[in-house]
Image (cartoon, coloured by chain):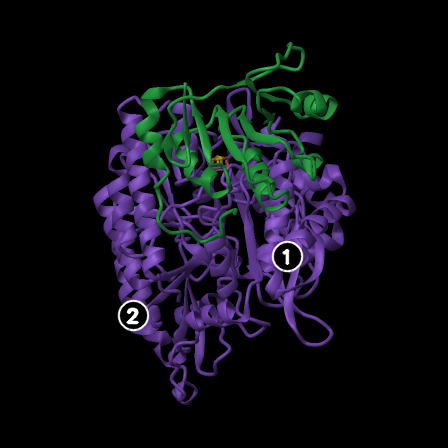
Amino acid sequence: MQIIKNKQLLAGDNWSFAADDSEIGDSGDITVSIERWKAAKHALLQRAGKTGLRLRPADDVAVLDGDLDGVELIELDFSGFGDGRPFSQARLLRSRLAYQGEIRAVGNYLPDQVYYLIRVGVNAFRLENEAQIPLVLSCMDDFSVNYQASSI
Amino acid sequence: MYQYTDDDQTLIEERVAQFRGQTRRFLDGELGGEEFKALRLMNGLYIQTHAPMLRVAVPYGLLSSRQLRKLAEVAREYDKGYCHFTTRQNVQYNWPELARVPDLLAELATVQMHAIQTSGNCLRNTTSDHLAGVSTDEIEDPRPYCEIIRQWTTLHPEFAFLPRKFKIAVSGSERDRAAVQLHDIGLYLVKNHSGETGFRVLAGGGLGRTPIIGQTVKPFLEIKYLLSYLEAILRVYNLHGRRDNKYKARIKILVKETGLEKFTAMVEDEWLRTRDGMLLDDERVAAMKAQFTPPAYDLHAADAPLAGLEDAGFARWFKYNTVEHRVAGYRVVFLSLKAPDSPPGDITAGQLDAVADLADQYSFGEIRSSHRQNLVMADVRQADLFTLWRKLDAIGLATANIGLATDMICCPGLDFCSLANAGSIGVAREINEALDDIDYLHDIGDLKINMSGCMNGCAHQSVGHIGILGVDKNGEEWYQLTLGGSSDNEAALGERLGPAVAKNRITRTVTDILAVYLQLRLEDETFLQTVNRIGLEPFRERVYADHKK
Ligand code: SF4
């Protein structure tokens, strides 16, 4: 597993996802669901480790409006590359909720989608297949011109 | 006609390079079949019964003679010497070889053409009125807005993976010739009480399996809000459209299931938050309008008389294949792609080249494609008509049948399409032969027969005056008929005639229907008017008479 952030390959990364029914320790950087965040925000933020969110495509980002203080990472979990909802989620997180932290694509997206994802505000990518790193990096520059404004 | 800037050109060239990489990865086994399918569809490439089929975009149906010549060259080099015009004003090649498609696209890019978003679950080609800019009933030319929308939809980063395909149409005239009400978003240019131009916005129309007529979501939208409103509709659709069932994924189902009022409220809520951030400024609109200024018309065109009407063939062609132009002394000419012996919409490379030359000579070098799979020369001097007719006749493009029964629209059907239940081209030919008598054809008058080979309805059978749909009955080809459909201002979906008929009865059924019309019509009444007045019963009685005995 590798992370590309702001078009650079990161040396290491300590984020992991904590499922709703899992125990959470004091240390470690973890992402949780919106439900868990809403239910246990204070406990989560008092931990030594950092806290982030993992959004499913069906999640409504509007419920996070004004509620992103302390969130250091938002993962958009692609259930399938054909499901385009995360593109709108990223867009809304950046332009409507003014979220400035890291937005990371995880799960089942295609290298061919990273150019679009960057334009809607995603700035980091988790790659399961390390052999694809050069391809993903080159896809980030597929186009040099655009017809629409980007997020941010 | 819109001319590409350097940026426009760069973008389509980079798209070719991107697609070349995707094709190479697929052929090398680095990219899976499912993944490549999604990516190639977004570039108009299907894998069909015999070979890949490539759909090339013709934005709002406008082509230059240079582009026509390139289409001809591509037809020769990469296909079997012909191509096909679709009901969406686009062009299809039926025989390109997958490995060569990137080269084909690179060729097209040299004349500002591409295949971007001509298929797949994304924003498709924006379509419009084939008489834009020249019709006598125009409120405003829709093409500048079409081009603005084309640019906005091209590689839109947020809406590239929608629940399903998404089509936008724009009409700027009183008579709707663009089937606006049958699109995911339909835009009519209208004037408000104070005389300002804006859009009436419709949403939720669409053909296919569940045909639905679009409903008005905004009676008057100021021009400056065009893109913000489109974005709001698209965002609501992208987030809330159904993704669990591809047959329920079009926006028409979302509008229907949500209810028009609630859907409109969701769009408005979204729009109010974004509209001020993305205004379409007057300057941009003016600059775009400047790309569509009228050609240098001959101010004395009306002085040169229309000659040749004593020739019956020319007179007939003049009557059916030309229409009034807003400039005196000019006519709009239709080139029929419905000659009795060729599949509807098909054109050969030789014909394309010849049309390009004629367009240069007689119509300012421009050609348009229409929704009924014909071509249009929009600006022909009346004094040139007779000569042009003779030249078109010599290349088989002067069949005098525009708007008549043999001007059928027809999908590729079983001959080319892997989804088809039944053939359509052969049936079209058979019906054509049965209607061969010119006097009979002209007596029937205005008639739209639309025929699709399966439920997907690519030939819009549900809005044909007579709609024919191929269905599969235990492995045999059968045909389901509907009557009374229309895609005009009074859009309507055809009503089912009755049980499907077998292939050997379809032509007979059509002629029976026409016989009932000729028998029961009142003076001057068109087929559609008669159907609307008398209902389907008299037609049923005749068609199914044998069964009752
Ligand atoms: S209507 Fe059906 S058979 Fe005809 S082209 Fe469309 S998908 Fe193919």
| x then y, percent, for residue B484 | 66, 49
Hue of chain B?
purple
Circle 2 chain: B
Q: Earlier in the sequence, mark 2 or mark 1?
A: 1
Hue of chain A?
green
Q: Is residue B16 visible?
A: yes
Q: Secondary structure at mark 1?
A: helix
Residue bearing the label numbered 1: B275
| x then y, percent, for residue B44 | 40, 40
Say which of B548 and A53 sits in front. Answer: A53
Q: Is residue B332 above or below residue B509?
A: below
Instruction: Kindly indicate the quadrant of the structure image that contains residue A30.
Output: top right
Does the numbered disc 1 mark a residue whose Cβ is under 8 Å from ligand 1?
Answer: no
Circle 1 chain: B
| x then y, percent, for residue A141 | 34, 41
The quarter of the picture where the N terminus of chain A appears is top left
